[in-house]
Image (cartoon, grey):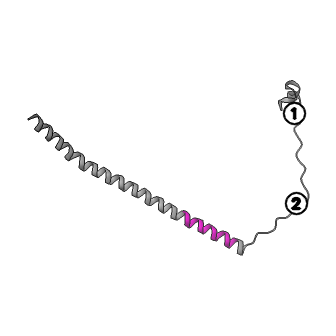
Amino acid sequence: MRVFWMLIKIIVGLAIAIPLGIVALALTVGLVGTLVGLAFIALKLAVIGLVGYGVYRFARAVFAPSKPTPVAAHELPLPRTDKYYEAAMRELDSELGPSAR
């Protein structure tokens, strides 16, 4: 009787586990298929965008050539260095020595 009862429990457990396993497998395959489909759609959109950008750049080069950039008449002088920064660097050099830089 114990063996019979053990077999009944195993059969009932498998009767519950097998359909749940099939449902879980179907859901997993469905989710993976959905993600693969979304990846292909994203890839198609990326290719379409790349082609569109290429067409835009080509049309811009053909119909609106770039204007030559004007050469600067004179160069602007560099801003003066900070005298306090220079004094601080001299002080550090005198304390730490020339090998600190």
Given the image, on which type of amino acid does mark 1 rest? Tyr
Q: Which residues are magenta?
A: 46-60
Q: Is residue 37 left or right of residue 73?
A: left
Q: Position of residue 44 (x, y in %)?
A: 51, 65
Q: Position of residue 95 (x, y in %)?
A: 86, 24
Secondary structure that dominates the magenta span: helix
Q: Would you name the residue on which mark 2 appears?
A: 72
Q: Nearer the viewer, residue 68 or 58?
A: 58
Question: In percent of the image, x 15 and y 37: which residue is there?
Answer: 6
Q: Is residue 80 above or below residue 26?
A: above
Q: Nearer the viewer, residue 4 or 97?
A: 4
Question: In percent of the image, x 32 and y 51: which residue is there?
Answer: 25
Q: Is residue 53 left or right of residue 28?
A: right
- 1 or 2: tag closer to the N-terminus: 2
Q: Which mark is residue 92?
A: none
Residue at the extreme top of the image, as rendered:
95
CA separation, marks 1 and 2? Answer: 32 Å
Residue at the extreme bottom of the image, as rendered:
63
Number of other residues with Cα within 10 Å of mark 2, as a class: few under 14, some 14 to 19, many 20 or more? few
State the SS at label 1: helix
Q: Is residue 74 left or right of residue 9?
A: right
Given the image, on which type of amino acid does mark 2 rest? Ala
Question: In percent of the image, x 33 and y 53: which residue is there?
Answer: 27
Residue at the extreme left of the image, as rendered:
1
Q: Is residue 95 above or below residue 36?
A: above
Q: Which mark is residue 84?
A: 1
Q: Is residue 29 above or below residue 68?
A: above
